[in-house]
Image: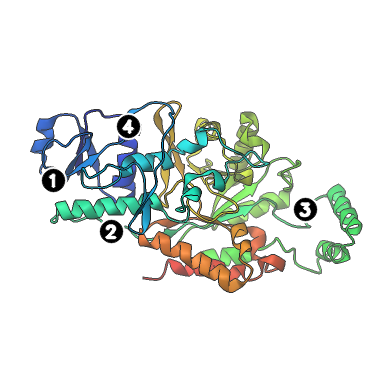
Amino acid sequence: MLLVYTYKITPRVKYIFKHICTRVLGIEVGFTTTIEAFIAHDSLKMSYGKQALGKEFFVKSHDILFEQGLSDIDFNVHDWDDTKGFFSTGDKGALPYDIFASSFYLLSRYEEYLPHVQDEFGRFIATESIAFKYGFLQQPIVDIWAYKFKDALQAYFPDFVFPIKQYSIKPVIDVPSAFDYRLKGFMRTIGGTLRDIFKLDFKGVYMRYMVLFGLKHDPFDTYKYIINKQKQTKHKFLFFFLIGAYSTYDKGISVNNKKFVSLMKHVADYCQVGLKTSFFATENFSILKKEKEQMESIINTALVASRQSFSKVNLPESYRNLIDLEIQEDYTMGYTNHIGFRAGSCTPFLFYDLDYEVQTPLKVYSYHLMDYSLLKNHSLLDKKKVLNGIISEIKKVNGEFVPVFHNYTFSDVGTWKGFKELFNIILDSSNEA
């Protein structure tokens, strides 16, 4: 166990040290404010504060972990080997930057509580983040810092054997609409037909009725392919089905449709199934509760995971609602149009509520790539290069890669040509040394 001496043990201190030491590096951590207990400890130990006690392993602290609430923070981001660092400690201590304070800033999403520009859906956008502004969005910087900390500790305690973590993947399949043409009902089918005619999209009209008459396969119906892929890998896929009411934002299939319910039950036999909450459920607790209960009646078990429509997170309200409903995991934290690490980490972390100053039980699985973000790269070769680049970054720190693909991504139609091959690259990445 690593024992940390600090003059004051705050919820923030405990939260971030446990993430870096236990979740990223796999070592237990304890805390003390008693010098005698610190001296008596005969294994890994360090002090964290403004001044070292003596010649022990010491990291100079920034004030943020000893504060409450929000404050204006001055940022000076510097190059640090092949990454960046901020909250400089000067020449005192074992590290040139307070990685614990810096990591807390990123993981707690401190910047998302501060005034910022939102997009048309009310979302925090990548270009507002310090990670984008200072060029480290595509690095799992919290994990990189953790390994720098590990290297410094190892040099100070050469006999200590650190556990070895393995790179892993957690593929997410997002299903905003289970089918393109099927199960839409008479009125939506007529409306879709008229829309296609108005756009002079006669190919669309032809395709719609060929599917409805059973002469062609619905392009969104890729479940057999995905389930076959699931059978070939040890990593459990996580499906998120939208079951909320039809609205301006959500165009799913009615949860009262028996064939749709049967599909979800079938998928749940092979993969984990979670709830893709509707757009209005993001801000309406009663709608969210209703959708949760509907999903639980379908999968016949307690709902573990959710993902919010349009990847919209309003902090802290969105996560508080999930906690109140005892949903354990969230997969919304990420950027739809930018590849990278919104919270700076490729290790799942617990949500820290900055208003209440408490670590919550909600586990946040930040996603690092959505299929749409790859469309910026026109050639398949460029897409592969970008995908392999992000995989390489995560492998360096033995992290967990969370990509988000949609059911229609596997249709191999139009802009989605080649995406099956990209998905195979992700699956194969976990088998490589």
Q: Distance between the residues labelled 1 and 4?
A: 27 Å
Q: How far apart are marks 3 and 4 (CA)?
A: 57 Å
Amino acid type, label 4: Asp
Q: How far apart are marks 3 and 1 (CA)?
A: 63 Å
Q: Which residue lies furthest to the bottom in this view?
A: 381
Of the image marks 2 and 1, the number of the one nearer the N terminus: 1
Looking at the picture, the colour scheme in use is rainbow
Q: Residue at 46%, 43% (x, y): give it.
A: 364
Of the image marks 1 and 4, the number of the one nearer the N terminus: 1
Badge 4, how many Cα within 10 Å: few under 14, some, many 20+? Answer: few
Q: How far apart are marks 4 and 2 (CA)?
A: 32 Å
Amino acid type, label 3: Leu
Badge 1, how many Cα within 10 Å: few under 14, some, many 20+? Answer: few
Badge 3, how many Cα within 10 Å: few under 14, some, many 20+? Answer: some
Query: Mark 1 highlights which residue?
Result: 43
Q: Residue 183 got which mark?
A: 3
Query: Mark 4 highlights which residue?
Result: 63
Could you tell me which quadrant the C terminus lies in?
A: bottom left
Residue 362 at least partly seen: yes
Of the image marks 3 and 1, the number of the one nearer the N terminus: 1
Amino acid type, label 2: Ile
Nearest to the eye among marks 3 and 4: give it: 4
Q: Distance between the residues labelled 2 and 1?
A: 19 Å
